[in-house]
Image (cartoon, rainbow, N blue to C red):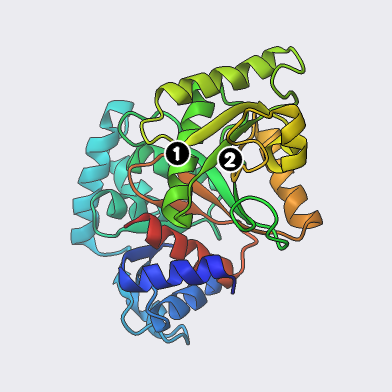
Amino acid sequence: MNAFIERLKSIARSNLRNIILPEAEDERVLKAAEYLLQEKLCNVTVIAEPQVIESSGYNLSGVKIVSPSDDELLKEFTEVYYELRKNKGLSWVEARRALSKPITLASVLLRQGKVDGLVSGSISPTADVLRSGIQIIEPKNGNKTVSSFFVMIEPSGAFGSDGILFFADCGVIPSPDSAQLADIALATASNFKKLIEDEPKVAFLSFSTKGSAKHSEVDKVTRAYEIASQRNSDGYLMDAELQLDAALNESVASKKAPESTVAGKANVLIFPDLNAGNIGYKLVQRIAKAQAYGPIIQGLKKPMNDLSRGCTWQDIVNVSIITAVQAL
């Protein structure tokens, strides 16, 4: 296990949070829950009938079980969900039916503060996870953009913060406008500061460096930087527009952007659209053999994260640890 996860493990152990894993019919989830409990990394809640957990074969002593057939609980949370969505035309009966989906019930539990964070997606499609997040958890006050980032750990340690970089957005918004890019940048910088405990250096990426090309797509990136700069109350180091080599390589940066405080030293990369972000993280993962953790969802009122349906139980553990630290 790498130093990044080991450090987060230590933080999580010292500040136990309750993470709900709603997809308890998945054996990978049960194995992850067993590990999280045995290693005392967080408290764990699952959605399942008690007899299913008891007969699972996993040591889940200490797990909190929410039964999907608990009438009292369902009545309480159906009322919450109905009040939340009735203005959208949802009936009480439809609200009750919706809570039969574990991701929906888990999201209401998170909204009501019954748990501290949520990890789902080993069975549920990403669209269902994101929809529950946006409709039930809701975006943070003052934020209209729900996005994602990947934690990338490249093995040489030569780039970013000792090899750690955050890539955003690689999983949610196909074609963000300038205001959305600004939201993505500020949210990712904040998460970098929280999870890495190092100074974020944010590069708004483009196919142009400092006016080397003229195009509306370049203008979108520079405008995003201007918006983010106006809202940058935390004083994060940011710059635009930068080509990838200028963002990461100091010798290139000295030629292309010699006045920049970020060029050559960036550790947070903001991609101009989902095509670039998704392709970029997979290139680094596959060709550079980097470890990739994510997509980690950001911009919601409470921490809720998605999994790939091809994830391993270790992936579920790692995302749960990240979620627990986000919940502090």
Q: Residue at left 37%, top 47%?
A: 98
Q: In the rendered image, which quarter contains the C terminus? A: bottom left
Q: Residue at left 21%, top 59%?
A: 73
The residue where tag 1 is placed is 187
Give how far across and how far down residue 21 sits, in percent: 42, 64
- Residue type, label 2: Ala
Q: Which mark is residue 102?
A: none
Q: Is residue 133 left or right of residue 281?
A: left
Q: Does residue 227 lie above or below 275 as drawn? A: above
Q: Is residue 195 left or right of residue 272?
A: left
Q: Is residue 325 left or right of residue 178?
A: left
In front here: 116 or 99? 116
- Residue type, label 1: Ala
Give how far across and how far down residue 253 sits, in percent: 72, 35
Q: Would residue 164 be visible to someone looking at this image?
A: yes
Q: Would residue 23 be visible to someone looking at this image?
A: no
Q: Residue at left 50%, top 35%?
A: 237
Q: Quadrant of residue 135?
A: top left
Q: Does residue 217 lie above or below 41 as drawn? A: above
Determine the CA span between mark 1 and mark 2: 10 Å
Asked whether the beta carbons under mark 1 and mark 2 sit within 8 Å of each other, the answer is: yes
* Structural crowding at the residue carrying mark 1, measured as other residues with C-alpha within 10 Å and reported as few (<14), some (14–19) or many (≥20): many
Comes first in the chain, label 1 or label 2 = 2
In front here: 259 or 222? 259
Q: Secondary structure at mark 2?
A: strand
The residue where tag 2 is placed is 168
Q: In the rendered image, which quarter contains the N terminus? A: bottom right
Give how far across and how far down residue 145 sits, in percent: 45, 31
In front here: 327 or 56? 327
Q: Quadrant of residue 262?
A: top right
